[in-house]
Image (cartoon, rainbow, N blue to C red):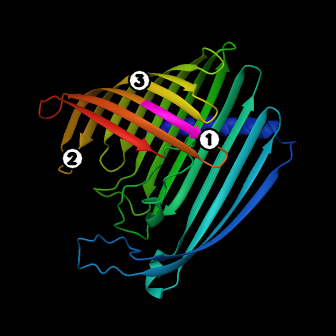
């Protein structure tokens, strides 16, 4: 199923890309190369836990060469941008040669506007060493669309690689001067060069979304959104099917700050396989509410959010039900 979903998403993305390429074939391309050289000293390059004294924690010195080029072409109706990037990591000590490697990145974005229709895509591919992928993949661009955060902390095989891709084609329809309908399909996938383990597995996540947005005035936006998510883990076929309906209100406070509020409900059907190969099937009914503030300046940005999630689980293997509240405050 996931293969077919990915094929459809990729085909849509390729079709959109061909539209953009045909439209901008006569436009000029801008190239912006970038070269960055850095050095670092590490106290624990293998990320050994502090509570395991039998594993020696040694220091290491390394250098990294980052080479990228941004390629863009645009006109009054369209924009097409690609950015390939490669980072070479080399350690000075011969005992750390297994930490040497390269990280590969490729980002793409395209958009074309007709009179009442806008189509576009966003793509992100990364092949990274485990040491980078599991700790340093958080994207500090606060407006990024890619959901990858890595951050599993699993470095059992630190010289292996983690592959990640994300693609999101979309189309937007202007229904009236104040109303817009947008349809998105996104697919993200994670896999590991060393295969799947009990505590670390690849997965695929596909989302279909429909958003109806209304501008009640020049500053205030009200949106109604519906998401359908399908998540599947590779090692144990864990499967989650989730439908979410929510509304959002957003309005700028001043030239620098903006305010948004979101509330919604969701229903998840799941099947989870334990390490003992026993399957648990059930469902959850949840609600989510959030309040957020955004600050944007020429030199930086700030996101501050308060998220409240209420979860009720039914139909578990133990025939029990529970209800829990999970407030969360975050600032980036």
Q: Could you tell me residue 109's position as x and y percent?
A: 67, 43
Residue at 18% over, 28% down: 315
Q: Could you tell me residue 267's position as x and y percent?
A: 33, 25
Q: Earlier along the polypeptide chain: callout 1 or callout 2?
A: 1
From which residue to which does the magenta span run? 291-296
State the predominant SS element of the stretch in magenta.
strand
Q: Quadrant of residue 7?
A: top right
From the viewer's perspective, tell me whether residue 173 is left or right of residue 51: right
Residue at 84% over, 42% down: 25
Q: Quadrant of residue 57?
A: bottom left
Residues at marks 3 and 1 touching, judged by CB atoms closer than 8 Å: no
Q: Distance between the Cα atoms at labels 3 and 2? A: 33 Å
Q: Earlier along the polypeptide chain: callout 3 or callout 2?
A: 3
Q: Residues within 10 Å of mark 1 (few under 14, many from 20)?
A: many
Q: Quadrant of residue 280?
A: top left
Residue at 38% over, 60% down: 195
Q: Which residue is mark 2?
A: 274
Q: Could you tell me residue 291's position as x and y percent?
A: 43, 30
Q: Earlier along the polypeptide chain: callout 3 or callout 1?
A: 1
The N terminus is located in which quarter?
Answer: top left
Q: Residues within 10 Å of mark 3 (few under 14, many from 20)?
A: some
Residue 250 part of the magenta-drawn span: no
Q: Which residue is mark 1?
A: 122
Q: Could you tell me residue 13's position as x and y percent?
A: 63, 38
Q: Residues within 10 Å of mark 2 (few under 14, many from 20)?
A: few
Residue at 37% over, 29% down: 242
Q: Tell which residue pokes out farthest to the bottom in this image.
A: 94
Q: Which residue is mark 3?
A: 263
Q: Secondary structure at mark 3?
A: strand
From the viewer's perspective, tell me whether residue 117 is left or right of residue 166: right
**Count of all numbered marks drawn on residues in the image:** 3
Q: Secondary structure at mark 2?
A: loop
């Amino acid at each position: 199923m996931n293969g077919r979903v990915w094929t459809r998403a990729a085909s849509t993305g390729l079709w959109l890309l061909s539209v953009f390429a045909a439209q901008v074939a006569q436009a000029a391309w801008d190239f912006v190369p970038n070269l960055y050289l850095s050095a670092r000293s590490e106290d624990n390059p293998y990320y050994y836990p502090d509570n395991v004294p039998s594993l020696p924690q040694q220091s290491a010195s390394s250098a990294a060469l980052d080479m990228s080029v941004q390629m863009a072409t645009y006109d009054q109706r369209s924009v097409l941008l690609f950015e390939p990037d490669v980072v070479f990591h080399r350690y000075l000590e011969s005992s750390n040669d297994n930490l040497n490697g390269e990280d590969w990145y490729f980002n793409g974005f395209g958009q074309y506007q007709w009179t009442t229709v806008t189509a576009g895509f966003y793509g992100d591919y990364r092949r990274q060493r485990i040491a980078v992928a599991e700790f340093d993949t958080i994207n500090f661009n606060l407006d990024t669309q890619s959901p990858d955060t890595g951050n599993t902390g699993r470095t059992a095989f630190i010289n292996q690689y983690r592959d990640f891709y994300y693609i999101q084609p979309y189309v937007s329809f202007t229904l009236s001067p104040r109303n817009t309908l947008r349809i998105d399909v996104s697919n993200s996938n994670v896999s590991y060069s060393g295969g799947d383990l009990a505590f670390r597995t690849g997965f695929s996540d596909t989302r279909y979304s429909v958003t109806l947005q209304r501008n009640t005035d020049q500053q205030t936006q009200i949106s109604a959104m519906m998401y359908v998510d399908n998540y599947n883990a590779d090692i144990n076929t864990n499967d989650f099917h989730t439908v979410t309906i929510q509304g959002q209100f957003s309005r700028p406070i001043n030239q620098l700050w903006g305010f948004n509020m979101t509330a919604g409900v969701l229903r998840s059907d799941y099947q989870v396989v334990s390490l003992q190969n026993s399957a648990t099937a059930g469902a959850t009914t949840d609600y989510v509410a959030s309040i957020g503030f955004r600050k944007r300046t020429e030199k930086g940005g700030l996101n501050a959010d308060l998220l409240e999630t209420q979860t009720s689980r039914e139909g578990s293997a133990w025939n029990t039900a529970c209800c829990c509240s999970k407030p969360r405050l975050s600032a980036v």
